[in-house]
Amino acid sequence: MDPLTPDEIARYQRHILLPEIGGAGQQKLKAARILVIGAGGLGAPVLQYLAAAGVGTIGIADDDRVSLSNLQRQVIHDTGTIGEMKTQSAADAIARLNPHVRTVRFEERFSQETAAGQLARFDLVVDGSDNFDTRYAAADAAEVARKPLVTGAVGRFDGSLTVLKPYEAAADGTLNPSYRDLFPTPPPAGLIPSCAEAGIVGALTGVIGTLMAMEAIKLVTGIGEPLVGRLMLYDALSARFDTVHYKRRRTKAE
């Protein structure tokens, strides 16, 4: 791994002071290549905190442009970037925040068709998309590519996140669960309204997105216990966190 420069040592001093991360962990972050799907409400804090943490290469996949209604929650963008591609706006913000971070832009929606090309250059995926088609495509593609996935979702006043590594075995020897073990099929179209239809508190996306960034940092540095087989739920109105454990559904083949 590349050594840290004097400027990087000064920038990441608070990380390096932590015995759990230290210089070796910071070098792992520098060497890490993380693809972030979506530069919206969840993707914004994910991108900001991963860039600030010193992740060396960050991919940004989004086919949308910045609009005025985004700015209530998509804090990586600002009034001056309205009309720009979100990937460009986010990449420029990252460059201002941390010039040591390299960004790769994909100005297309992540899908089954684009998955292989987008995943090839990265070793970890964070899905902050806002639709079920992309979430299932990301989960299926990451499983096939054997790459860990941090995925989250929000709605009005609540959110959730989990970590998926279904290609690895748990401590008891059974395979870790997949996204489809947690959510076997997408809900019928129109059953769950989008944030444009139902509304959402902007700060909520910051809570869940920051937690997603923390899980990604844990995975890269190898510290703590990632949310594998656990779904973390957050209710903003009651200020309550809950964790639900879930397992792999056994099939005839298993």
Image: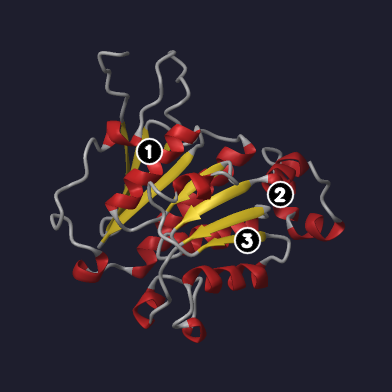
Q: For mark 1, does the 10 Å Cα neighbourhood hold few (<14), some (14 to 19), or many (20 or more) residues?
A: some
> Which percent across, then down, holds residue 111?
38, 51
Name the image quarter holding the N terminus.
Answer: top right
- Disc 2 designates what residue? 30
- Helix, strand or loop at label 3? It is strand
Q: What is the residue that sits farthest to the front in this orientation?
A: 113
Quarter residue 129 falls in: bottom left
> Which percent across, then down, holds residue 212?
46, 50
> Which percent across, then down, holds residue 183?
25, 38
Residue type of the residue flagged with mark 3: Thr
- Disc 1 designates what residue? 140
- Of callouts 1 and 2, the N-terminal one: 2
Residue type of the residue flagged with mark 1: Asp
Image position of 163 with respect to 53: above or below: above
- Disc 3 designates what residue? 103
Q: State if disc 2 and disc 3 touch (CB < 8 Å).
A: no
Q: 219 or 107, which is in the foreground?
A: 107
- Of callouts 3 and 2, the N-terminal one: 2
